[in-house]
Amino acid sequence: FSQILFYYFLDKEDSFDNFKIVTLLFLLLIFVKITVAPLGLVVIYLLGFKKNRINFLLFFGSIIALVLVLKNLIITGYPFYPLSILPINKDWTIPEKLLTFFVQISENAGYFKTAVSNNQSLFDKLISWIQLDGINRIFNFGILLLFAFGWFVKVIKTEKKYFFLYLVLALTFLILLFTSPQYRFFLPVFVFLFVLISSTVFSYLKINQKTVQYFLLVVILVPLLFTEIITFPNLLKNQLHQEKEINSWSQILIPNENSKFSKIEFEKIKEGNLNYFSPKDELFFYGTADGPLPCVNKLQLNYLKTYYHIKPQQRTHNLGDGFYSKKTKNE
């Protein structure tokens, strides 16, 4: 969706219809992933102090903002999650130290091979980020090169909208770089700059459009054809990602289970008033596969009990009423 947003933003026709499309796409994106928030600058750029555009943005923006706040309150107790400001005083509100723990894991996942939770300086984080190997290195070095080459692209230097979008994308990347630079977060930026620079190169070399189309078709199809016979141990360090799926023609009509670990067994464990299911086999820290509800990995629960003295409990006998965090330090 981000690429469609960029397309309509760069469209020479500055119409109200284009503005509505850009605005709705941005609101959809920010509802899915808050990390795209800086892209809101392209919406502001198109406002132009026009009353109909301002009213449109305020109306639909207010709806999305309200839904986001309500969702955050219901799930975490913090209206502006992942920020810990203005928590509500409810039993289901996540303890602040637990919230900090999960936020730190998410942030550190972009800098380190393992999601370490100890405090590191920003300099150490950036050094670690640039030294990541595998597919992380490709995207990390790639995005830096794309921004460097992008500065010399003629259309960026000569056309106002392209230059503004380049600055917005740079700001987006810098914010991610100083918070949680996981390549999946800046992938839309990577794709746009890569396509724009490639297009510029093809135009400069005066390559026939048909040739470009065939080239792109080969680039897309070849990796798909070889995924079944080639592994990428140097790119994918995660052992779970290296395990190949068993595909069959029947999947065209009848899809597989929604987890490749759907066949593993689960054990039922009682923790206070909570009866939960955990995988018997060892998975990663958060791994639950496709277990019956409520399902949580006992590794995670035991870790939180040991180091944070917290365990989840049902709010009532009805599972649908949710959970709260109970302190266990004095038990």
Image (cartoon, rainbow, N blue to C red):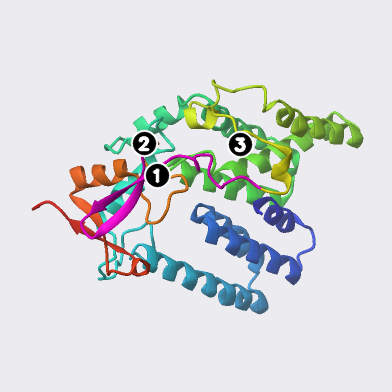
Closer-to-camera residue (95/299) = 299
- Determine which quarter of the picture holds residue 220: top right
**Extent of the magenta region:** 255-280
Cα gap from disc 1 to disc 2, whole angstroms: 7 Å
Judged left or right of residue 78, residue 156 is right
Amino acid type of the residue that numbered disc 1 sits on in the rendered structure: Ser
* Position of residue 304 measured from the top left corner of the image (x, y, whole percent): 24, 46
Q: Quadrant of the N terminus?
A: bottom right
Judged left or right of residue 110, residue 166 is right
249 in relation to 21, above or below: above
321 in relation to 213, above or below: below
Amino acid type of the residue that numbered disc 2 sits on in the rendered structure: Ala
**Which mark, residue 106?**
1
**Residue at which label 3 appears:** 147
Query: Helix, strand or loop at disc 2?
Result: loop
**Residue at which label 2 appears:** 115
* Position of residue 320 measured from the top left corner of the image (x, y, whole percent): 37, 68
* Position of residue 233 measured from the top left corner of the image (x, y, whole percent): 54, 21
* Position of residue 112 measured from the top left corner of the image (x, y, whole percent): 40, 32
